[in-house]
Image (spheres, coloured by chain):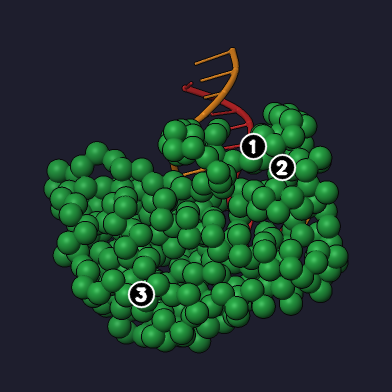
Chain colours: A green, B red, C orange
Amino acid sequence: MPEGHSVHRIANQFEQSFVGHRAAVSSPQGRFAAGAERLDGATMVTAKAVGKQMFLEFDNGLWLHVHLGLYGAWDFAGEIATGHSMAESRRRRAATRKSENAPENAPDDDGEHSMASIGAPRTSRVRMAEQEKAEDDIESFPPEPVGQVRVRLLTDTAVGDLRGPTKCEVLDAAGVDMAIAKLGPDPLVDSPKKGADRFVSVAGKKRTPIGLLLMDQSVVSGIGNIYRAELLFRARLDPHTPGNQVPEEVLRALYKDWTKLLKSGVELGQMMTMDGLTKAQHAKALRSRADRHWVYHREGLPCRVCGTNIVMEMAAGRKLYWCPTDQT
DNA sequence: CATCGATGTTGAG
DNA sequence: TCAACCTCGATGG
């Protein structure tokens, strides 16, 4: 279920709570027993998200590649990061990348920072999927695996249980490169200029409707059905417009807006796709899903801007919501 | 308590 | 184009 922002948050969780720790890797469910054996006992050295895919590197040269698909989730327990400390981690990750890639707008390093911001008791528990949900504390560490756990990553201080993924495999470095090469730019991985250039050059040449291009992970990474509908509305763009008929400056603006929404989603832990709200409206939107979006899931309801009923149509098997008056 | 549908992708036909 | 994957909250009886 998760769109790009949640996968980045999960990678941040691994970076904060698992990287640098030796991990006992197992497959309580059994379906990943062979893969788990190859990683068991290794130390995690990198946690990286590209679009909706996550890559965890271990010090034996192998990587765990996970895609949560429609209903996958990670359950974390122990000394783990919860809530707002995540934004700090993201900034640190961006600063680290700066030294490698020199993206133009990487924030300054905030310097010394560590588990201090976690501040969570050893027994806290959180489920991270499309949303995050704190759950009842565990009584003892580690907790027994509950239900169908494909992979368990257990360190001295934290445990992560993966359930329901669409993809869970062990790759070597070349395999990771191949997987990433298939993906379009991710604003939190690629520099603003390179990312936008790649998106514009690919999307701007295709006859495919822009509403489908935004969902194509080889064109741009991390956008799902909610962000797709909302980005198109925010640009007042008809979803059926062929990519090669969207003006270049509009494509650039779309990518820039995706960058903004993704960063906001990583910081808030929620998809907030509306702007210009009062403080009270914003707080309300964060609490209730129904007040959070311009068009998504609003079929038959009046457009928040013009009052026309929002329409829904099926596009490549997914529900596409849009305003036929504003998006022309 | 049974059924439905979902913020996703793959692969069969 | 559509079922399958295999989870779980929301919905309805």
Q: Residue at x 51, y 53 (%)?
A: A2
For badge 1, the amino acid type reads His
Q: Position of residue A127 (x, y in %)?
A: 35, 48
Q: CA distance from mark 1 to mark 3?
A: 38 Å
State the residue position of label 3: A108
3D distance between C-alphas at marks 2 and 1: 7 Å
Q: Nearer the viewer, mark 2 or mark 3?
A: 3
Residue A309 left/right relative to A92: right
Rendered position, A311 above or below B1: below
The residue wearing badge 2 is A321
The reply to whether the C-beta atoms of the residues labelled 2 and 1 are less than 8 Å apart is: yes
Label for residue A297?
1
Q: Nearer the viewer, residue A294 or A31?
A: A294
Q: Earlier in the sequence, mark 1 or mark 3?
A: 3
Answer whether residue A114 is visible to the viewer in this image: yes
Query: Mark on residue A87?
Result: none
Q: Position of residue A310 (x, y in %)?
A: 74, 35
Judge by depth and name the residue closer to the eye, A295 or B6.
Answer: A295
Kindly identify the residue that appears in the image at 39 percent across and 85 percent down.
A99
Q: Earlier in the sequence, mark 2 or mark 1?
A: 1
Identify the amino acid type marked 2: Tyr
Q: Examine the rendering and report whether any part of residue A56 can be seen.
A: no
Mark 2 vs mark 3, CA separation in Å: 38 Å
- Image mark 2: chain: A
The answer to whether residue A271 is above or below residue A244 is above
